[in-house]
Amino acid sequence: MKKINILLFFILSGFSLWAQNKFTKVADNLFERFEYVKAAKEYSLLVEKGKSDGYVYKQLGECYYNMFNTVESAKWYAMAIKTEQDAETYFNYAQMLKANIKYEEANTQMKVFAAKAPTDQRAIAFNKNPDYLPSLIEKDKLFEVKFLDINSEKSDFGAALYGDALYFSSARKDSGKKYGWNEEVFLDIYQSNLKADGSFSEPTPVSELNTTYHEGPVSITSDGNTIYFSSESFNSKLYEKNNAKRLKFGQVHLFKATKKNEKWDAITAMPFNDKKYSTSNPSIDKEGKTLYFSSNMPGSIGGTDIWKVQVNNDGTYGTPENLGDKINTPGDENFPFITDDNVLYFASNGLTGFGGLDVFIVDLKKNDFPINAGKPVNTEKDDFALTYNTTRKLGYLSSNRSGEDHIYSSIPICKGKIKVVVKNLNDDSLLPNSKVLILDENNNVIGTQVTNENGEVIYDVDCEKIYIIEAYKDGYVTAKTSLEKLTGGTIVVNISIKPIDVIITETEIILNPIYFDFDKSNITKQGAEELDKLVYVMSQNDTLKIYVKSHTDSRGDDKYNLNLSDKRAKSTVQYVISKGIDASRISGKGFGETELKIDCKNNCTEEQNAINRRSEFLLVK
């Protein structure tokens, strides 16, 4: 794939030699030089002249595979497999078919690949779950993805935000030496600054790091003083010669620079670079102690693997370590990025995905297996170089889903869980079969569940939102609680609901006193709890009709108190009706201070006044 090899562009390919001949010599030389555009033209001429065979068809498939022209690549691979081919050709063909959303055909080719290479990790994974796609498509969305305005018409990828500066690689410059792989100019490192409104400034090249060769992507330490970046080994005069073909074969290598006077200075090559293999795509951890990178150095499981190396306090480096076969496959793993909380993002075409490169996530603290990031991060095309700034909560993704490598914002969708446990307020016993509602901050019901035998329900929710929980059960008073904004994880909410204790006589329903605030007629929280008991009793016996008498204390003049008590009676009636009781079954009237509970006149205490401000519930029927 272009994204893997764009920074491995001078590694000699190991294609089969059995079908090379004098007719393929020109095309083969171009292929060896990674000039795939020109090589494809030469191989195509052989097809036109009738001098093609399975080897030529395969080479055409390989050329377009490396240029990620999925339609042309699949077309020529289809021709190639009419003759016997090596296992990797069938795997690559399957990848191209998946990229063209031809999954059944891709599975057919994967079965051939698995039969030819049964011990290959990719074959084993496929045989375990050949029908993985539906579950992958149905995964919960983990990120919101949006195209960035800083993209050019050429390749732009590998973006990462450090402070307010976004660094990325681009082939956007108007002129310069072109790269035969895809006939674009060589990549340079660019910087764009994040503005207050969330947009970015016009990108500018980081001139002190750029050379006539490819550069990027980069990684910067948390103090902002050290940058690691990929460039070509020609810059450190490390390469191999092929005198017969007058070629120099270089590698991609890692370099380091330090900041001086706001410029990057003192560029040095990493000591573990070697002319026989590549080291690229750096990512330094928060402490600046571990550098992650991709390489095909000895000890690699596949084409390119994810590696790490210790950065010592004295500026020296430890021995590079392969991250092992939980992460690396016989395919290619590339573009590692380590977050501040030790979560590793990387791209792979060897793990189970949609086709091409997919982004995978693994929490290194938990020693888990990688998970596919799912859609919309991953598509049938190449998706890679996912980075995330934990301080800004901003992420960036690279993808060729539009036909060219471009940069997208990739913002994680925060998910959390609310576990609600409903209990009896009196004895703390669990209450199964309770109804639990979850509401948004505008009191819109967004979910309803019934508790299990342990009195529990669990809701999956989005973060950074306010939620309200209500719990109901026949014979109990409804309880409600508001929650703070979630930031992820699972929170446990214990709700204790009170059994309804109502006394019903021949003449009235006796509740605990319903009190009103002084000079007010609105229903208080305490009043609502008591009225819910009345609602429950009336809902259980639809023949009951209630007459509400509302009273005031003796303060204020008679007329004012009569009016105030009438408002309280109407508020009480309206509350009961709002809970689903038919309006014909409840009515009420205010009696002011004409029927004081405690006749203390103007010498009443606050407690006596509160007792006089009450409502009574008489049985009409």
Image (cartoon, rainbow, N blue to C red):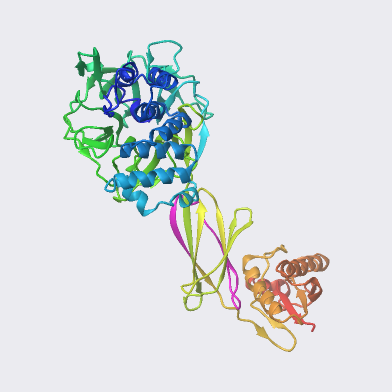
Query: Does residue 370 show up magenta in the picture?
Result: no
Q: Position of residue 573 (x, y in %)?
A: 76, 70
Apparent side of residue 255 relative to residue 514 in the rendered image (left or right): left
Which of the 4 quarters of the picture holds residue 601?
bottom right
Is residue 562 something that shows in the picture? Answer: yes
Q: x, y percentage for residue 59?
A: 36, 27
Q: Is residue 474 magenta?
A: yes
Q: Nearer the viewer, residue 245 or 214?
A: 245
Point 73% across, 89% down: residue: 506
Is 163 situated left or right of 251 in this image?
Answer: right
Which image quarter is the C terminus in? bottom right
How many badges with numbers are in the image?
0
> Where does the N terminus fall, quadrant-wise?
top left
Residue 389 visible to an observer of this rendering: no
Find the magenta span and give its range: 471-493
Viewer-nearest residue: 452 or 617? 452
For the residue pair 264 and 240, the one nearer the viewer reads as: 240
Q: Residue at x 45, y 40 (%)?
A: 98
x then y, percent, for residue 596: 74, 77
Instruction: State the image coordinates of residue 200 (x, y, percent, origin top left).
Output: 49, 25
In which quarter of the view is residue 292 placed?
top left
The residue drawn where x is 22% and y is 17% is 236
Q: Is residue 551 left or right of residue 356?
A: right
| Extreme residue toward the right, this view | 559
Extreme-front residue of the structure: 50
Nearest the viewer among 534 and 521 is: 534
